[in-house]
């Protein structure tokens, strides 16, 4: 069977996705173990019929103008703040994402960060490896309790809900802030929907799961940190710019809040210098969805979406269904 379409994949992804595309397309993949430069991206998508792209690729007017033949762009992520959805919709170009398959992996990571910072795991590990440990001590590495505390969820969608449901083992009170009522969390956990100020003031742990939008940028700044308890911890596995990172560093240094666990950064891959020297923050390099299963399923979903777009069919995880005349 001759292959009708040429597609470009902007970074090596699990092979299952590439293999699926190869059945019907000529597939070119970024050969480097790094994101493409802007020039490389534009050069490679020039004559592509479809593009499988990443959250590190800015998919904007210039890209749409360059990839004139592209029948769609399939993002390898659930977040799509890297894409100009309005412009694509105006041009009738479908875009898609990979919701659902990374929900548990991401919520698990938020819990891993919560435990790591509350129980000072990274700091203690470094101490032991340094050869400084002289034996058990009653005052060593005292941390925070988790059992029975209050968990505040900002953005009670798929991942926020999974994060909240996993708190059952720790008998926590759950508060959430979202414009939508979350019946699952209310029925299963007795969770309470509250305004942002209440969540900030009453939570012992706050976990961020809202998307990056103009309205959520810098949702966590000095004003918010001042409302939090001095003993509270902030966990972010959503998107970096939801936090004003330099103000977070100040809040952590001055003891305004107790600690933070971060997977994402305001200016990725740069991390605010001050954070690097603080012990009360645990830093991971944007790996919340990095389980073999989640990343393989993301590759398959992105490939299926792209194939549907190429065939002129509705992409199953389309994020701008208006292009198909839907609302
Ligand atoms: N670190 C990672 O690798 C990683 C992995 C997966 C997802 N993410 C991020 O997590 C986000 C959430 O993913 P999801 O699948 O749960 O999305 P989702 O759409 O199911 O949930 C997002 C929720 O946030 C709510 N929301 C929107 N604006 C809000 C605001 N101002 N205040 C409070 N809530 C608000 C929405 O109503 C929705 O309920 C994604 O947008 C993505 O950026 C990061």
Image: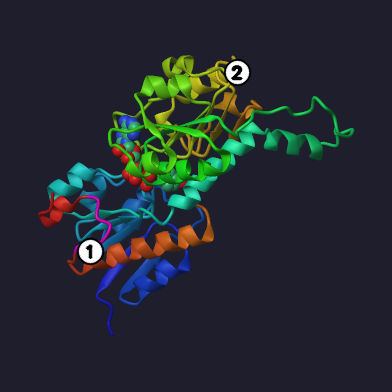
What is the quadrant of residue 74 in the picture? bottom left
Q: Residue at x 13, y 57 (%)?
A: 324
Which secondary structure, mark 1?
helix
Which secondary structure, mark 2?
helix
Residue 82 seen in render: no
In the image, residue 268 above or below residue 246: below
> As drawn, is 324 to the left or to the right of 284?
left
Of circles 1 and 2, which is in front?
2
Q: Earlier in the sequence, mark 1 or mark 2?
A: 2
Q: Residue at x 64, y 25 (%)?
A: 278
What is the quadrant of residue 266 in the picture? top left
Between 309 and 317, which is closer to the camera in this rendering?
317
Numbered circle sitting on residue 185: none
State whether label 2 is within 8 Å of ligand 1.
no
How far from the left and from the top, in percent, is residue 253?
60, 18
Most prominent secondary structure in the magenta stretch?
loop
Residue holding disc 2:
253
How many circles with numbers are drawn on the protein? 2
């Amino acid at each position: 069977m001759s292959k009708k379409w040429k597609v470009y994949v902007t970074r090596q992804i699990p092979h299952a996705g590439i293999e699926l595309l190869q059945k019907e397309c000529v597939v070119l993949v970024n050969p480097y173990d790094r994101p493409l430069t802007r020039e490389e991206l534009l050069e490679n998508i020039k004559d592509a019929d479809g593009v499988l792209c990443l959250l590190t690729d800015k998919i904007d007017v210039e890209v749409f103008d360059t990839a004139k033949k592209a029948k769609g762009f399939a993002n390898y992520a659930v977040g799509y703040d890297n894409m100009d959805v309005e412009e694509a919709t105006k041009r009738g170009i479908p875009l898609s994402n990979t919701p659902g398959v990374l929900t548990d992996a991401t919520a698990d990571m938020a819990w891993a960060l919560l435990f790591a910072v509350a129980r000072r795991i990274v700091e203690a590990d470094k101490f032991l490896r340094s050869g400084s440990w002289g034996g058990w001590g009653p005052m060593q590495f005292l941390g925070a309790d988790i059992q029975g505390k209050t968990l505040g969820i900002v953005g009670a969608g798929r991942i926020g809900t999974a994060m909240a449901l996993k708190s059952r083992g720790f008998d926590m009170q759950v508060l959430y802030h979202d414009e939508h009522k979350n019946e699952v969390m209310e029925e299963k956990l007795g969770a309470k929907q509250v305004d942002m100020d209440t969540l900030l003031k009453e939570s012992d742990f706050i976990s961020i799961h809202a998307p990056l939008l103009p309205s959520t940028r810098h949702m966590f700044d000095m004003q918010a940190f001042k409302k939090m308890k001095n003993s509270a911890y902030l966990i972010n596995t959503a998107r970096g710019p939801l936090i004003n990172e330099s103000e977070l560093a100040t809040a952590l240094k001055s003891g305004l809040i107790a600690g933070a666990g971060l997977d994402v950064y305001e200016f990725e891959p740069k991390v605010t210098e001050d954070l690097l020297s603080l012990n009360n923050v645990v830093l991971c390099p944007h790996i919340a969805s990095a389980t073999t299963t989640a990343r393989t399923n993301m590759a398959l979903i992105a490939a299926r979406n792209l194939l549907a777009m190429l065939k002129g069919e509705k992409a199953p995880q389309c994020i701008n269904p208006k292009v198909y005349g839907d609302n």
